[in-house]
Image (cartoon, rainbow, N blue to C red):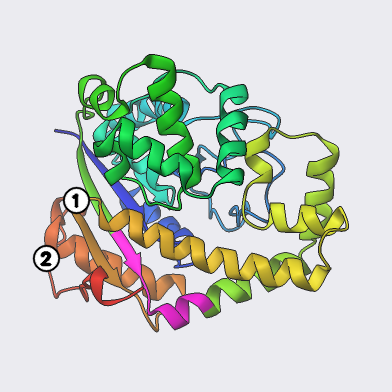
Amino acid sequence: MNQVLILLGPTGVGKTGASVLLAKELDTEIIGADSMQIYRTMDIGTAKPSGEERGGVPHHMIDVVDPSEAFSAGRYVEMVLPIIESLHSRGKVPVIVGGTGLYIKALTRGIFTGPSADWGLREELLSLEEGEKGSLYCRLLALDPEAAARIEKNDVRRTVRALEVCLRSRERISLLQEKCTAPLPYEFIKIGLTRNREELYRLIDARVDDMVRSGFEGEVKRLLDGRPDRTPLQAIGYREFASFLQGQLTKEEAVSLTKRNTRRYAKRQFTWFRKEEGIRWVDVTGRLTSERVFSCLKELLLNSHAGLFPDRPPRGGAVMYNIEDGA
């Protein structure tokens, strides 16, 4: 069975630079799994790798749609599958890199698309939630307890989608997912990067400061002027700076909230990935350069999947990590 290597982990953990070195070592190409880097012009706030940072390695699924276009996990899989097949036909192992758990889940377990978005119904549901916090989750619990058990109580977005599917299809989303989802025919090698929580949060805060210095405010202003689809403006950083530009926050408040919300997002990413099976975690705490992170990845892969590296015998052992012990 053809292999697909997935490098995942929370935002700011060090995936980008290490993945470029890994792709060079394997003589392959990178497929992004980031739900915001797919959008053109959203460069600074998504930490999109520059041409120089890509190091000559071809990157796919970056800059593929305009912010005015809607995008979904189903469309992501449709676009990625031909890329995977093309790489396999050339004898290359695709390296998928990102932290969007839904995209990775869709690739590794198959995708359930369900009915298309009904924005009128969603607005109606959201207004009910505003009137009584938690009411949507309680409604989903009554309609589809199995689906509700898979969703965090405060995850309004996923709760709304589950209710939308139930109400429009008149079937439980959990039943539809079971009937309509099939795994893809690849051997997925899933490697997760993690760090000590304090170190990760310091790196996240430093990244936000770099974003501001790099002209993030101007990027958000141009995005607002372009009248994007709803989703891009919900991205962390963009929504806070949009509120600043609209006079609802000070710049200092926007920066502070962006840092806080990014840290919270990293924590949610860990929560999501805990539910994924087959991830081998590597602790890269204290390894602050791409070269040092890559060395950990390489040791692990040599030890467990030496066939990825022709004529390289297994050696040593990478520092393994139990995600339950950390962030």
- One can see residue 134 in this view: yes
**Dot 2: element:** loop
Residue 196 is a magenta residue: yes
Horizontal side of residue 131 vs 156, given as left or right: right
Q: Quadrant of residue 41?
A: top right
Residue 244, horizontal then vertical, whole percent: 82, 59
- Can you say which quadrant of the picture contains the C terminus? bottom left
Q: Which amino acid does label 2 sit on?
A: Pro
Q: Quadrant of residue 120?
A: top right
Q: What residue type is labelled 1?
A: Glu
Residue 252, horizontal then vertical, whole percent: 79, 73
Q: Which residue position is annotated with label 1?
A: 277
Residue 157, horizontal then vertical, whole percent: 50, 41
**Dot 1: element:** loop
Q: Earlier in the sequence, mark 1 or mark 2?
A: 1
Q: Which residue position is annotated with label 2?
A: 314
- The magenta segment is 192-201
